[in-house]
Image (tube, helix red, strand yellow):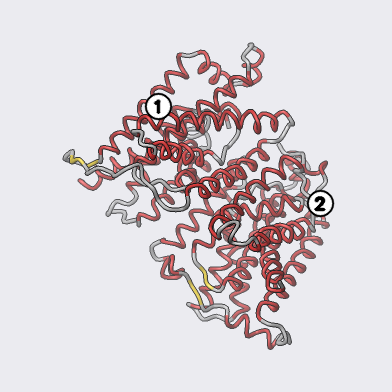
Amino acid sequence: MQEAFQLLANGIVIGSVIAVAAVGLSLVFGVLGLINVAHGDFLTLGAFTALVFVGLGLPLYVAAVPAIAAGALAMGGLEKVLWKPMRDRGTSNVNLLIISIGLALVLRHVIFWIFGARVQRFGPVSERIDFGLFALTPQDIIIVVGSAIALIGTGLMLQKTRIGTAMRALSDNKDLAEASGINVSRVILYTWVIAGALTAYGGVLLGLQGRLFPNMGWFLLLLIFAGVILGGIGSAYGAMIGSLIIGVAQEMATHSIIGLPADLKTAVAFLVLILVLLVRPQGIFGRRKAI
Amino acid sequence: MIAYFQTVLITAGIFALLAQGLNLHRGYTGLLNFGHVAFFAIGSYTMAIMIVTFEFGLLISFIAAMLAATIFGIVVALPAIRLRTDYLAIVTITIGEIFRLVIQSGPGVTELTRGPRGIRGYSNEFFFLREDLGLGFLDPQMYLLVIVWAAVIVVGLLLFLLLRSPWGRVLKGIREDEDAMRALGKNVTSYKIQSFAIGAAIAGLAGVLFAMDIGSLSPVAYLPLITFQAWTIMMLGGMGTHLGPIIGSIIFWSIFNGTLFIPDSIVTGAEAAYLRQIGVGALIMLIIIVRPQGILGSREEMVLDK
């Protein structure tokens, strides 16, 4: 039983990281219909930007600010120089997906080139605190709280602000949104900027777990997809819930009763992803017409 | 210098096969397969396990490898083929990763695949065979090169004939307009599965030859990067053309391996490896931006993407 609670807690921690990244991916998909394979590498970008500033002697919570700015700037900038011009030329979504694969390779290996392959850390990970049923490091707790703040913030943004309403309108029905006077290009740009900020922030949270390496975001990408698709692709709230389920499911799979080797736990999450796509492609919260 | 051309041509031939299979999926049927490396891996591993663990002969192991890839292709295609194109992309890339994780650490499976330690010692019979084939005058590398390119040419001819047949015209019809083919009474799903299975078999063959080239198998040789390289090659040469995968592969590997000539004083080996991957990524983007139909493709045929 103890083991189950510990795995549940671990699952919630990793699920929280996945959730922050997944919301960004889901927002972009909702508004543009684009599956951005480079999304994971923007987590890495965020984590390593923060690492640079931590190296300059800043505390991590300060270093997270330039990291978030870098993510927002990178995704927003790419919308300006790459995605928008390509869309204007009538490039199909399939070809845009292929471009994002190229972008992922470029971004990841630029990070490899600059920082090398070795594993780095923000700082030493503290001792676990025993909560009785489970034990977590202070970093783990910061991850969960930090993720919750970002997710609630995003939820409020979507519900309460004009831009959030416009984003929801756009993912609901692009033509109708445009006809009702929403400045589509501007909303798309803001969507990228918000997604970039969230993703880079997610990268900082992922780095807090302990290990920073250039493949960190790429390795998380399929888990992010799994969270997004399980929750219902294009639904930001679905992405949050789906990610938590994915996080918990892959940790639980290593429970001694099931006895799966830890190496295979991601395979479990991938299997969930495939099953959802086959059985209920609209996910838990998605509507069928969105598919 | 000769060694360089040999290496380039062997790798180019193997990847030309891989891209030929992919071209059948993507170029001729319009299927987005991003898990091609799984069929490649199943070819390598089936052959190696048949020879090393079960001590079967080379020919039977060769056939078994292609058969296994075919069956796996059908198993993957049966459920996945009905999905929307971009979902098919995600499912196939995921299947590729699951497959790699399972051969690396699947309980029970690792007794056959030996997990990260990998398999070796399966290629002796293949190289001894060159005496019997009357190719004894060739050195092992040259012999492998001949076999690889013989396979590329045979597969290329078979694909040429297949795609000129009524069967091939249905495939192209599916690529252009699935609903129209359905309206004509064609069983679109069945055709797609057939296309998937044949492409997978070709990838399995490529996997067998790749295994002979590298001499020992391990799961790290089967990263998703292999799939992306095959995609780059296919797009570079031109999707939906017969010579595209071949020309694309030769150009791709000439450039890729050519960077090995850059002296260490300019970039170190590790840095050069990263720069090569940056180059692959940039090339993928550049093809789509500048010439999405590739070198040989015709624009009219390839801009019909939904």
Which mark is on residue A151?
1
Which sits in the foreground, B203 or A156?
A: A156
Mark 1: amino acid: Leu
Q: Residues within 10 Å of mark 1 (few under 14, many from 20)?
A: many
Mark 1 secondary-structure assignment? helix
Which sits in the foreground, B82 or A62?
A: A62
Give the x, y percent position of residue B17: 69, 63
In percent of the image, x 45 and y 41: which residue is there? A48
Q: Is residue A244 visible?
A: no
Q: Chain of mark 1?
A: A
Question: Above or below — where is B182 with respect to A65?
Answer: below
Mark 2 secondary-structure assignment? loop
Distance from disc 1 to disc 2, alpha carbons, whole Å, reads 48 Å
Q: Please tell me how many numbered marks the rendered image carries.
A: 2
Q: Chain of mark 2?
A: B
Give the x, y percent position of residue A219: 46, 47
Mark 2: amino acid: Leu
Give the x, y percent position of residue B150: 75, 72
* Residue lying at the far top of the rendered structure: A181
Which mark is on residue A17?
none
Question: Above or below — where is B87 with respect to A236?
Answer: below
Q: Quadrant of the C terminus of chain B?
A: top right
Q: Which residue is mark 2?
A: B296
In percent of the image, x 56 and y 74: which residue is there? B215
| Marks 1 & 2 on one chain | no
Which sits in the foreground, B161 or A129?
A: A129
Q: Quadrant of residue B122?
A: bottom right
Q: Left or right of A94: which side holds A107?
A: left
Q: Is residue A177 visible?
A: yes
Q: Left or right of A154: which side holds B193?
A: right
